[in-house]
Image (cartoon, helix red, strand yellow):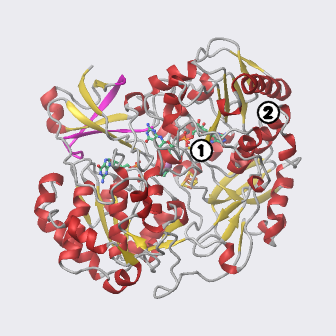
């Protein structure tokens, strides 16, 4: 018996649409969903390695209760009832002694996030947070400061773009399959690609122009680009006149930031900066200055992201073909989205959040997501109140939040740690109880509302039954809710029932997803009318260069540029990033992917390495103000002398993940926990390290 199931990949959070071939209850093949433009059969290496995740005997096979010390690795197998009762009893005790706000729920945003949020609203705790701040919090705030929309409400029409500028957006290694395919189509059609990175990544090798920028100085480059564009009147004057407020302020501000000034700061020749400004203007508005993701993690990241968005604004590329666009939902066609459990009625929660988002400490970060990196400081200082229980779902605070030593100290203070995971991740290893989720091929998930130029919905659909004693997160959370008296908020007995309920207002049925894996609300792309119809959500209804969001909170829209200090000798700026072969901290133990890439190394510039007596593959000591570790070196000309680089996600501590245990070094151990207090992201690249032969 063989059949094909249309579903969604979850080897990373991009959620590419897939087609799964199942024979006699076994997954034989996975490929990109051929019905989805941009996928057409393709997958990235991690997506293809989904099969080895399914058959991995090292994932968590049943609920586990800790018997030794935290992190010691002593466990006993438990039944679901035992594990849920255990977690439920502890939660009740914590809530009784310290109030519901002492419970924090952290997760990587996923399709059942509305279920987790419902759990927290039901118990009366304000403390749900997602990974968002760690990934792109400052991008989110920057977008809201200019347009009134979050970054998640914006998209990029890469396929039709004629010039794409990437600031460390390493698209050919930090992959989203559709985006890569769309970019390749654009390049085949003659589009230009400018890539800026202190390190020669794979994307640099595909670019028409590559600049090895001095690390941390992209903001200086952008101020100079804006200077040239305004001085030479290269911008889309009609668009700016119609839609932009604050141009005179911007013009005054950038007057002194000349290309010659930026050359000294960035190392990029002034003449080349002028050349790029002129080149992009020739093809405006089909120009994209990519505003994501992780190229610039600095304490002033918000201003770097704003400068990128301002460049798009000056090109008139917002809501233009080949530029950026606002995602349209079913409402644009008079239709309804899938409903969510969070739409139920709850008692109002008036307590402040653990991370102080919405108070004077963090007035602007998005309260829908919170600021994850405040978790450890909040626990350690009982500030603003004691936090006593953590539920971590599909998220690893030990490896995904900077300063692991600080996090370990904080975890020690908790009365309860619950991990909902598929692997022996480090947080599972430190948990009191592990509630294992079925992997994506084994489960049906909540609806994915995919807004965009054409609003659609996708469904992750169970391809095979679970190999081990695992359940779906939305069922686990419901069952935990039942243990503590809030079961009524979860009125479903199976995932199919939940999905059918979600679809009720939409006019589509569960069965409608069978033939292609998705449904579309309409056939045509929806662009707003560029003369009259763009619906900016700022108070002025315009793009606010001088931002009311920032200024009402007491922050400047245009703070003076602060020069980035140079580092010399054996001191370097630590920068981090992805490989095409792994997802963050998730896949290092995957049999296939581990074989292809089993250990990270520290990239160090050849000249610097030779002065320090370091050769390739020598072990080196890396030390920062908060941690240190050993890692093999990779000596190369392909990195700026002021930076060292490592791939994120290695140095796992969980011994039962035997293939990746103790391989390489975790960047989180070294990175200091510093925040962009306006934007909300951690400043992962503001850590300086010393490097010495080990
Ligand atoms: N130091 C440092 N920190 C970072 C970054 C960095 O570069 N360096 N990058 C930041 C960025 S951009 C992001 S997006 C975040 C990502 O941070 P995380 O979301 O924490 O990272 P992931 O590796 O995506 O997933 C974490 C956990 O999800 C588990 N998991 C995988 N699939 C499933 C599943 O189907 N169900 C369940 N329940 N669990 C599952 C994995 O086993 C793993 O333990 O990290 C951020 N933090
Ligand atoms: N294979 C794979 N693909 C992924 C993911 C994954 O884990 N694995 N994760 C997904 C997620 S959640 C995210 S957020 C995206 C991340 O997508 P990207 O942001 O494109 O990926 P990173 O590898 O984090 O990019 C960091 C790059 O920035 C460069 N950089 C460092 N400092 C500077 C600087 O000062 N200026 C400039 N211009 N560049 C600098 C680094 O050298 C590195 O090449 O990838 C997504 N896709
Ligand atoms: S980018 Fe790769 S791993 Fe991520 S969802 Fe798509 S195919 Fe899966
Ligand atoms: Mo991310």
Q: Secondary structure at mark 2?
A: loop
Residue under the image location 66 percent in, 35 percent down: 421
x, y percentage for residue 419? Answer: 66, 31
x, y percentage for residue 228? Answer: 19, 72
Q: Main secondary structure of the magenta part?
A: strand
Outermost top residue: 68
Q: Is residue 355 above or below residue 535?
A: above
x, y percentage for residue 345? Answer: 79, 52
x, y percentage for residue 676? Answer: 39, 45
Left or right: where 355 falls relative to 414: left
Q: Look at the image and say whether residue 642 sits in the magenta stretch.
A: yes
Is the shortest distance between ligand 1 and the CB of mark 1 under 8 Å? Answer: yes
Q: Look at the image and say whether residue 647 sits in the magenta stretch.
A: yes
Of the pair 613 and 70, the residue shown nearer to us? 70
Of the pair 595 and 649, the residue shown nearer to us? 649
Left or right: where 399 falls relative to 63: left
Residue named by callout 2: 469
Q: Quadrant of the N terminus?
A: bottom right
> Can residue 176 be seen at all in this image of the molecule?
yes
Q: Which residues are magenta?
A: 626-648
Residue named by callout 1: 108
Q: Is residue 75 above or below residue 385?
A: above
Mark sitting earlier along the chain (1/2): 1
Q: Is residue 487 above or below residue 655?
A: below
């Amino acid at each position: 018996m063989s059949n094909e199931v249309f579903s969604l990949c979850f080897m990373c959070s991009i959620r590419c649409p897939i087609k799964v071939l199942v024979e006699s209850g076994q997954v034989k093949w996975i490929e990109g969903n051929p019905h989805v433009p941009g996928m057409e059969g393709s997958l990235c290496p991690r997506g293809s390695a989904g099969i080895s995740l399914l058959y991995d005997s090292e994932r968590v096979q049943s609920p586990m209760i800790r018997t030794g010390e935290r992190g010691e690795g002593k466990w006993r197998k438990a039944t679901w009832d035992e594990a849920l009762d255990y977690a439920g009893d502890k939660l009740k005790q914590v809530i009784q002694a310290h109030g519901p706000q002492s419970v924090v729920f952290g997760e990587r945003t996923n399709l059942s996030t509305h279920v987790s949020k419902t759990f927290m609203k039901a118990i009366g705790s304000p403390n749900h947070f997602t990974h968002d701040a760690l990934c792109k919090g400052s991008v989110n705030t920057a977008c809201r400061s200019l347009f009134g929309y979050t970054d998640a409400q914006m998209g990029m029409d890469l396929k039709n773009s004629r010039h794409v500028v990437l600031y460390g957006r390493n698209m050919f290694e930090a992959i989203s399959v559709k985006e890569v395919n769309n970019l390749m189509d654009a390049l085949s059609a003659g589009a230009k690609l400018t890539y800026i990175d202190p390190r020669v990544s794979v994307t640099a090798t595909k670019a028409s122009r590559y600049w090895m920028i001095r690390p941390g100085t992209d903001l200086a480059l952008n101020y100079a680009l804006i200077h040239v564009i305004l001085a030479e009147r290269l911008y889309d004057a009609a668009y700016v006149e119609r839609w932009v407020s604050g141009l005179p302020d911007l013009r005054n501000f950038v007057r002194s930031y000349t290309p010659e000034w930026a050359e000294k700061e960035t190392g990029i020749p002034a003449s080349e900066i002028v050349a790029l400004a002129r080149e992009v203007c020739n093809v405006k508005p089909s120009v994209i200055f990519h505003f994501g993701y992780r190229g610039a993690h600095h304490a002033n990241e918000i201003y770097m992201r704003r400068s990128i968005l301002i460049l798009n604004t000056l090109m008139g590329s917002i809501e233009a073909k080949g530029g950026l666009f606002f995602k349209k939902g079913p409402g644009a066609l008079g239709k309804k989205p899938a409903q969510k459990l969070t739409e139920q009625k709850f008692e109002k929660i008036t307590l402040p959040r653990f991370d102080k988002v919405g108070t004077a400490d963090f007035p602007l970060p998005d309260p829908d997501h919170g600021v994850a990196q405040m978790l450890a400081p909040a626990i350690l200082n009982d500030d603003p109140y004691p936090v006593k229980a953590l539920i971590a779902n599909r998220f690893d605070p030990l490896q995904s939040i900077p300063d692991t030593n600080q996090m370990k100290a904080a975890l020690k203070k908790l009365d309860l740690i619950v991990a909902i995971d598929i692997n022996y991740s480090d947080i599972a290893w430190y948990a009191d109880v592990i509630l294992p989720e079925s992997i994506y091929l084994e489960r049906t998930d909540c609806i994915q509302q995919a807004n965009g130029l054409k609003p659609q919905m996708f469904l992750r659909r169970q391809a095979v039954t679970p190999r081990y004693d695992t359940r779906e997160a939305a069922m686990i959370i419901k069952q935990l809710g039942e243990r503590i008296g809030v079961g009524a908020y979860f009125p479903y007995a199976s995932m199919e029932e939940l999905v059918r309920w979600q679809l009720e207002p939409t006019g589509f049925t569960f069965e409608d997803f069978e033939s292609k894996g998705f449904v579309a609300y309409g056939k045509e792309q929806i662009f707003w009318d560029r003369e009259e119809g763009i619906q900016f959500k700022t108070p002025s209804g315009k793009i606010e260069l001088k931002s009311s969001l920032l200024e009402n909170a007491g922050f400047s829209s245009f703070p003076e540029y602060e020069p980035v200090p140079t580092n010399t000798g054996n001191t370097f700026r630590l920068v981090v990033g992805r490989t095409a072969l792994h997802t963050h901290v998730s896949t290092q133990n995957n049999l296939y992917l581990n074989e292809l890439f089993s250990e990270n190394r520290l990239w160090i510039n050849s000249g610097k390495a030779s002065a320090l007596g370091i050769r390739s593959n020598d072990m080196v000591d890396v030390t920062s103000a908060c941690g240190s570790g050993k890692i093999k070196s990779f000596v190369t000309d392909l990195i700026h002398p002021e930076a060292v680089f490592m791939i994120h996600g290695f140095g796992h501590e969980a011994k039962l993940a035997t293939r990746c245990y103790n391989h390489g070094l975790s960047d989180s151990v070294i990175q200091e926990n510093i925040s962009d207090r306006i934007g909300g992201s951690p400043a992962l690249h503001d850590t300086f390290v010393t490097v010495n032969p080990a």
